[in-house]
Every structure is written in structure tokens, then in C-alpha cells.
Amino acid sequence: MKRTLSATVALGAAGLLVLTGCAAGESEASDTIKVAYQKFGTFTQLDAHMKQVKDAFEAENEGLTVELVPIEAQQNDYFTKLALMNQSAATAPDVMYEDTFMVESDADAGYLAPLDEYTEAWDEWDMFYDNAKSAGLSSDGKTYGIPMGTDTRALWYNKDLFEQAGLPVPWEPATWEDVLDAAATIKAKLPDVVPLNVYSGKAQGEAAAMQGFEMLLYGTGDTLYDADGKKWVTGSQGFEDSLAFIGDLYQGGLGPTPEQALDKNIGNIVASEWLPQGKLAINLDGSWLSGTWLETGTAPWPEWNDVMGQAPMPTQNGDEPGANSMSGGWTLAMGSKSKNKDAAWDFIALALDKDNSQSYDIAASQIAVRSDVSEDPDYQAANPTFGFFSEIVAVTNFRPATSDYGKISSEITIAMEAVMTGQQSPAEAAAAYDEAVVRIVGEENTTS
Amino acid sequence: MAIVAEEARPVAGPGRGPVPRPGRSRAGVRRSLVRSVPLVPAIVLLAIFLLGPVISSFYGSFTDASLTGSAAQGSSFVGFANYAELFADPDFPKSILLTLVFLVASAIVGQNVLGLGLAILMRSSSRFTRGMVGTFVVTAWVLPEIVASFAAYAFFNDTGTLNTLLASVGLEGTNWLYATPMLAVILANIWRGTAFSMLVYSAALQDVPPEITESAEVDGARGWQRLAFITVPMIRRSISTNLMLTTLQTLSVFTLIFVMTGGGPGTDSSTLPVLAYQEAFQFGKLGFGTAIATILLLVGAVFSVVYLRALKPEVD
């Protein structure tokens, strides 16, 4: 009996030791700056940029270390992983790479620290264009992100394939019909080539919602959100027509097969294989696309500028202003749980000073948001498409800056996938989207 | 997932130890209490790491916890709102149905029947055949889940092994993962899980005394009669344990489906675990995703109770 008791006590004590071992937290020194950013597939320019800034920062600031945390994930998974990191002070980054459309939502979530006291004292802040500054602004009037660059979207087309198919170069489509007709011609003349790629479906996340759907919707005259009334639009004809375009494209065999389009890797495959190898004729994509083909990119393609042409995405029926584009862009933001905010700011300011902004904008094919960069002759000469993509800023649109946008954008990709796979008609998918929007924001915040 | 602690006792022959007397003395109760004290650390650990998550998931399903937006700062109690939304969502009944189809076809029918069949066939086969078949079947079980999933993906892919094989004999296969996603994941899960059932049944069959089978044979019972009336009743306890384990394992299969089809196309292979993951981590609705996980937990519990009741493994 006695032996049983003592053995019990010993075992119990061992169990307690294990438990306390689990509970003991770790304390983190604040002389380390943790920088979280995305690195995925062909997008490696930011990784190179961050490594370079880390070296410069550590050389300037004796005793401080920069810990780089490249998150290797496709865009939606990146947001998830970043949000999970931000949930706990032990893992939250000091500096993070943040999409402008997530700024509002993540500021609401308490993940981001306001930067106004720092920007006030930063003499270079005046170099940023006003519309770029507003991209990092939340509805509480505070700045949460310093923009790195912006982007626009348009049609990229392969001039060689167009000539083989007997289509005019330069190509100037005036309506959606023109785009689909050109795709049909390619399909008839060059059966081995994928005629037209428009990103679609849940797997592509924000790329499908923005590069795909919104590029169509904002060309119909309808919008997702009524910014004046602060209400979400439901039941619009433009929404259904945009879904019908996706349906025609995928169900009509003018696009990639739905299973190719639903592959998480399609963005990488398009940029590094299909376009350089002449397997895709038209691609609705972003201004940054050529960054992959530069010498510094992951799939260098010296002839890209001779082969690839660009055309603005036309509006549905050619109505004013004739073309449409969407703009987004990414910022560097500071984590609210940072233990050394001053050093985190110094890192951001260094990463986005004139020289560093310029080298990043050139490497990643970004449209500059600093006037001193965009006026620099080296920047202008670096990429022949910068002129084209800067011009369509005139017709560009921005995504609704509300914290519900992320959830609603997911619903758009669900509707797209239902239509592209033929599971729902455009009208059914649009009705399901309307119901989902009402569920998310409430009946009183919608208008039709 | 907590597996109901049902010890898989070895099949006891006649002449077991004495059955505990129904009316115990007070000293006896105290002694057994003291004797169970060494179990306390284990129970505490189980409570923290198994019961804890279950309770926290249950609580989380009543909140609006979210990955981003204002609800991420501090979630608030929303009552049954998540469940109301879930039951109004047309994807949900579809997902329940897909989960049940996946469960019945791949675990209850596929793995169990195939596993039992293989075990019976292997008993009467030569040593060489037994070794070969055993190795092949167990290979799928030995592979880590992610590797097995990629292997299945490569097999069923449009340009994968299966279609290449079909093409070599002049047949044109379809795109399995896209056209018949449920069939593909069910076959993959049968391939992966059969080894487990086979091993359980092989062990159980060895404990069936040959005398009984032989005397049945003398009485004129045919092969299938011996199987249905002698062998199956005698290994009933193993069947019940195995059904329970494969059911719970299959209900929680996520990697296989996620890698092979991602729950798609559309929602055509979104079983409950995949749906819960998508809602919680792709769309950031943690509370909503947790509600789906809680439903999954209930489905598992229902199956466990049904097995325990119907097959009464504790009664001989």
C-alpha cells in the first residue's frame, strides 16, 4: 500500500512537471524585427528586396537583427497565415506585407498599428501621390500602410499567334463581343492554343475576384458597392452579365479547361509556361506580369516585349470611357503587437526610400507611387510597358474599402466557380451571391 | 478526434477470470479508488488535450470569431446564429450527404468488406501470395497521408497513370478528378485504408478455433454459411471495433480530398472537414467553421453510439 502511494505521488509530480513545462511561455527580445511577407511561385522579387534591405538595415543599426519570415503560400492562404500569426503576440510580425484591400479589415481586427506619428515626421512622405496615400488609409482616418507600388490590369496578347490566326495587330477590342470573337477565331485557326484566360474560381481567390470578375463588372456600368450611399449592390444586371461572360468562356471552350483554371498554380503556369511557349493567346492579367520575364525574374524571356502586346480591357458595349481597369497595390504595415515600433518604422522607411522603392518597382514591374521614382529616367526606361499601364490609370477603379470586402470577394469566387463548372446558371449564381451578401452585411446595408 | 476508449481486449476463450461480484465491500471501493490514482496524470492530460479542444470548439461555434475584421479583436457570443446560417446554406445538406456517401462507400463498405475478403482469402493462400499481397496492401497504409494523397492525385489526374494505362489499351478515360470527384476520392480512400481492416481481420480470424469451423463443415455447412453463421459472429467484436475506428478515421479525412480535388469542382466533393476548413481558414469565418466541425463531431458520436448499441461488443 505504501509503495503504491509513493509511486502515485511520484507519477503525479512527473505529470505536473510536464504540464508546467507546456505552459511556460517564452519571452522575446525586442531587438529583433520580424518581417513577414509573401513569396510564392514566380513572385520572388519581394524576397530579394527584403534580403537586401535587411543587410542595409543591420549595417545601419548596430545590435538590431531583422528576422525575415517569407510565407510561401498562394494569396488567400497568405492572408490566412498572416492573420494566424497576428493572433498572438508571440508570433505577430513587426512589419508585414499587406494588400491594400485588407488594410481596413486588419486595422479593424487590431492587427495593425497607426503610422501617423511617424509619417508626420517623415520628410519623404510628401513624395507619395495622394491617391496612393489614401490606399493605406482606414475609415477611421488613420494611415496603416505605406504603399510600395500600385498596379493596373489589362489584356496581354501574343502578337505572333494573332498574326498566325489572321487577327489585326495592334489589337483594339472595343466591346466584350470583340474579345470573345477574337478568342473564337483563335480557337478555330489554332486549336492547340488556349484562346483566352480569365482567372476564375475559389482556388484563385482575390486574383479571380479582381483580375477576373471586377474587370468585367466595372465595365458594365454597375458596381459592387455604392460608395455614396455606403450600401452593397445586389441584383444588378451587370453582375449577371459578368457571370455570363465567365460561363461563355469556360463552358464554350474558349478558355482553359475548368480543371486547369481551378489549379492553384495556374497563375505561375500562365506566366512561366503558357505565355512564353505560345500556348495562350490572350490573358487578362496585371501590369506586374512582365516582372517574371525580366532578367531578375524567375522565367527570363528576352523576347517578351516583341511578342506580347497590351490592350485595355473594353467595357461591355463600348460605353464611355471605353475601357476599364482595376487598381490595387500592396503596402508595408506595422504590427500592433510590435515590441519595438520605432525600429519597425525605421525598417519600413528604409525599405521604401527613393532608391529602394525604385529598385523594387522596377524588379516587380510595379507602377511607382512616389513622384521622384516615376519621374526618374532610369525607372521609365526600365520597362517598356510602364507607359501603357500608367496611362490606363485614367480609367481605373478601386475595390470597395470596407472591412466586409474580403468576405464578399470570397462569395464572388464561389459564384464564378458555380458558373464556370456549369453547376449553376448565371442567374442562379447571382441570386445565391445576393443572398450571401445580405447574410454578411444585413439587408439594411444593401441596395438593388 | 477522441476515439471512444473501448479497449480492444483479446478474444477471451472459455474459462476467463472471475467476474467481479456485484455487491462490493466499502474497503473494496476504497482500494480500487486508490489503485486508480496513478491514472490521474493520464486523465488530466487527456482532459487538456482531447476534451479541452472539444469544449473550446463547442463554445467557439456560438461566437462570431473571425480571422480579420472587428470580430477578430474580440469575438462575441452570437447564440445559434452560426447554426441558423448553416442550416439555411444549401451547401450544408449537400456536404452532409457527400460525407455520408464517402463514409458508407469508402469505409463501411469498401475498406471493411475488402479488408475482410482479403483476410479470408489470404488465410487459405500460399505463403508467397500472402506475403506479396500483404506487402502491396500495407504499402498504402505505411505511406504518410500527404504522400498517399499525391500518389492518388497523380494516378487519377487527367494525364495521370490511370488514363495512360487506359490509353495504352485503346480506351479513353475521362478526367476522373473533375468529372467523378467523389468516385476518385472514394477509391483512393479504399486503397489507402483497406490495409488497416485487413490486418485487424487477419488477427481476428486467427482466433477462430478451427474445431468449430470443422464441426460446422461436418454438419454440412457450405462455405458462405460457415462465413455468415460461424466466422462473422465469432469475430463480431473485432468487426465492431474496426467499424468504429475506420468510421471515425474516414469522417476526419481531409488531406486526401483537399489534395486531390480541393473540395471541387464547385462543391462537388466538399465533405464536412473540407467545408469547415474553407469557411474557417479560406474565408476567415472561424466561428462558422467551428460550427461545421461541431456537427462533424456529432455525426461521429452518433455512429459510435449506433455501433456500440447494435453490435454490443462487451457482451459475449
Image: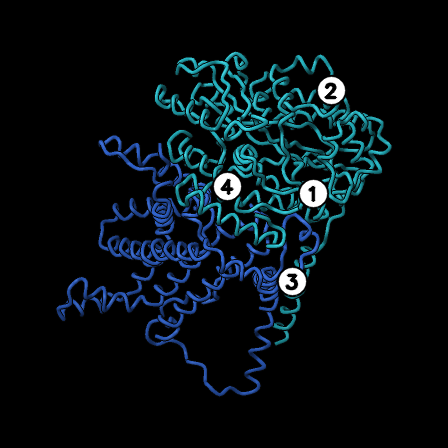
* Numbered marks: total: 4
Closer to the observer: label 3 or label 4?
Answer: 4
In the picture, one chain is blue; tell me its letter. B
Q: Amino acid at mark 4?
A: Gln
Please identify which colour was used for chain A in the image: cyan
- What is the spatial separation of the Cα atoms under label 3 and label 2, in whole angstroms? 49 Å
Please give the residue where the numbered disc 1 appears in the rendered image.
A104
Judge by depth and name the residue closer to the eye, B205 or B109: B109
Residue at the image point whose x is 57% and y is 73% from the top: B36
Q: Taking A49 as reference, is B28 left or right? A: left
> Which residue is the site of mark 3?
B77
Res A416 visible: yes
The alpha-carbon separation of the residues under discs 2 and 1 comes to 27 Å
| Numbered mark located on residue A237 in the image | 4
Residue where numbered disc 2 is placed: A373
Circle nearer the viewer, 1 or 4: 4
Alpha carbons under labels 1 and 4: distance apart = 28 Å
Tell me the number on the disc at residue B121.
Answer: none
Same subunit, tags 1 and 3: no
Which image quadrant for residue B172? top left
Is the same chain shared between marks 4 and 2? yes
* Chain on which label 1 sits: A
Upstream in the sequence, badge 4 or badge 2? Answer: 4
Q: Secondary structure at mark 2?
A: helix
